[in-house]
C-alpha cells in the first residue's frame, strides 16, 4: 500500500556530494512488512538490483513506487551491470535451437548446468512460434534475442549471414543482414543491409564488396560485429569488423598462432573476443583478446584435446569459463565441459533437451525493446 511521508525535509548540501546512483525516490514497502519499512532506500535499490528478472517482474505489483523503480532506466542499467559481473552465472542462461522433433528454442540455467548433476531445459516463448517454421539464434545482446529472418527475400537474394548488437552512441539495437544470390541474368550478387530498431527500417550500405565474411553469424564485442573471413581455400584467415555506430569496416589483428593445417572460428568469452584454433582433430587452442584492439593482449587460455569420438566434433563455440577454470564448449550438436586441472571431460545432463544447431549464453535483463 502506498503512503505519503509527512516528515520529508529539503535536501542538505551534503546530498549533492553523494556518489552517483539511481535517481532518489521514496520507495514504499508493503504494509505487511513493517520492519522492512525502516530500510534505507539505497539498500532496497541495491538488493533489488541483484535479484533475478522473474522475481523483479512479480515485485512490480508490490507498490507503485516499486513498479516505478524497477521500470526506471537507470535501475535497469544497474541490474544488467550486476548480472553481467555475477561470477557464478546464477543470472545467465543458455539458449539453443533444438531440431527434433521440430525446430524450437529451449533455455536452461547456466549455473545449474555447470554445477549440478542435472538441469532442466524449458521451451522459450517467442513471436511467430510455429512447428512448421525453422528458427535460429542470431545473437544475444543485453539479454535481448532476435530470431532469424528467413522470409527476407528481395530480387532473388536471401540472407546468408547475420549480426546483432547495440549501438550505444545512438541508443539503438541493430541487425546486419548480408544477402546473396543469383539475380540480374544469373549473376551472383551480394547486398548488405542494416536494420535499426529505432526507425524500424532497413537501410542498404556499401560494405564487404571484396567478398562475404566466412562465419555464419557475427560476434558482438566493444560496439562492433566480427566475422572470420577467408577469400579462398588457400588464403589466410582474417577477422573483419563492422562498427555499428559509424558503419566503418576494419580488421582485427589475429593471435600469433601457427597458421598450418587448422580451422579457426570466432567466439566471445567474458565479453572478450576469442578465437578457436582447431588443429586437425588433435586439439583446439582457445585464444582471448583481453584488451580489445590491442594485438599484444591475445592470450592462449587453454588447449582442449579432442575426444576419440570423431563423429561428434569438431569443437566450435566456447560458451563460458567457470571460476574453477572449466570451459564449456559446443561439441558437434552437444555441449561438453573440459577441466584443464585434471584433463577430464564431462557432458552435462539436461532434461527436456536434444541435439541442437547452435547455442549462446545470455544474461537475464529488464531491457525493453521499445
Image (cartoon, rainbow, N blue to C red):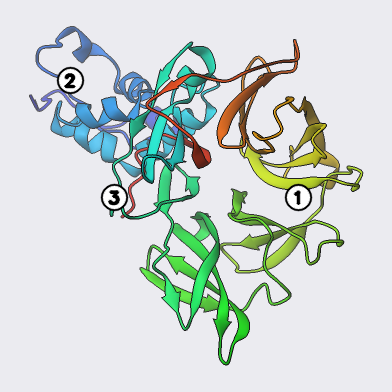
> Are the residues flagged by discs 1 and 3 in contact, CB closer than 8 Å?
no
Q: Residue furthest top?
A: 35
Tell me if residue 294 comes above or below residue 270 in the rendering.
below
Element assignment for label 2: loop
Q: Which residue is mark 3?
A: 129
**Sequence order check: which comes first, mark 1 or mark 2?**
2
Frontmost residue, 313 versus 64:
313
Q: Which mark is residue 293?
A: 1
Q: Which mark is residue 65?
A: none
Q: Are marks 1 and 2 in contact (CB under 8 Å)?
A: no
Residue 196: x, y in percent?
Answer: 43, 66
Q: Which secondary structure lies at badge 3? A: loop
Instruction: In the displayed orientation, state which residue is furthest to the bottom.
Output: 185
Between the C-alphas of marks 1 and 2, the distance is 47 Å
Q: Which of the 4 image quarters holds residue 65?
A: top left
Which mark sits nearer the N-terminus, 1 or 3? 3
Image quarter where the C terminus lies is bottom left
Amino acid at each position: 500500500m502506498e503512503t505519503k511521508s509527512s516528515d520529508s525535509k529539503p535536501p542538505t548540501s551534503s546530498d549533492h556530494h553523494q556518489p552517483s546512483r539511481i535517481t532518489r525516490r521514496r520507495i514504499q514497502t508493503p504494509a505487511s512488512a513493517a520492519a522492512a519499512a525502516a530500510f534505507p532506500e539505497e539498500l532496497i535499490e541495491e538488493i533489488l538490483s541483484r535479484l533475478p528478472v522473474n522475481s523483479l517482474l512479480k515485485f512490480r505489483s508490490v507498490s507503485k513506487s516499486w513498479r516505478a523503480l524497477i521500470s526506471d532506466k537507470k535501475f535497469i542499467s544497474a541490474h544488467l551491470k550486476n548480472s553481467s559481473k555475477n561470477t557464478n552465472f546464477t543470472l545467465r542462461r543458455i539458449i539453443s535451437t533444438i531440431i527434433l522433433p521440430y525446430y524450437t528454442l529451449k533455455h536452461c540455467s547456466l549455473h545449474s548446468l555447470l554445477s549440478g548433476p542435472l538441469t532442466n531445459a524449458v521451451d522459450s516463448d517467442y513471436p511467430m512460434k510455429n512447428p512448421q517454421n525453422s528458427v535460429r539464434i542470431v545473437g544475444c545482446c543485453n539479454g535481448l534475442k532476435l530470431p532469424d529472418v528467413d522470409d527476407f527475400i528481395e530480387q532473388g537474394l536471401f540472407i546468408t549471414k547475420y549480426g546483432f548488437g547495440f549501438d550505444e552512441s545512438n541508443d539503438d539495437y541493430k541487425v546486419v543482414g548480408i544477402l546473396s544470390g543469383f539475380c540480374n541474368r544469373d549473376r551472383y550478387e551480394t547486398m548488405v543491409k542494416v536494420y535499426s530498431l529505432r526507425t524500424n527500417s532497413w537501410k542498404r550500405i556499401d560494405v564487404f564488396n571484396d567478398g562475404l565474411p566466412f562465419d555464419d553469424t557475427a560476434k558482438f564485442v566493444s560496439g562492433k560485429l566480427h566475422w572470420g573471413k577467408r577469400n579462398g581455400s588457400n588464403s589466410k584467415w582474417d577477422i573483419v569488423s563492422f562498427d555499428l555506430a559509424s558503419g566503418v569496416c576494419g580488421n582485427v589483428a589475429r593471435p600469433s598462432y601457427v597458421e598450418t593445417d587448422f580451422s579457426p572460428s570466432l567466439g566471445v568469452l567474458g565479453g572478450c573476443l576469442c578465437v578457436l584454433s582447431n588443429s586437425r582433430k588433435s586439439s583446439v587452442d582457445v585464444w582471448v583478446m583481453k584488451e580489445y584492439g590491442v594485438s599484444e593482449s591475445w592470450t592462449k587460455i587453454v588447449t582442449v584435446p579432442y575426444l576419440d569420438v570423431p563423429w561428434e566434433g569438431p569443437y566450435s563455440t566456447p560458451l563460458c569459463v567457470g571460476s574453477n577454470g572449466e570451459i564449456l564448449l559446443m561439441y558437434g550438436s552437444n555441449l561438453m565441459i573440459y577441466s584443464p586441472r585434471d584433463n577430464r571431460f564431462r557432458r552435462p545432463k539436461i532434461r527436456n533437451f536434444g541435439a541442437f544447431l547452435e547455442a549462446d549464453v545470455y544474461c537475464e535483463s529488464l531491457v525493453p525493446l521499445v
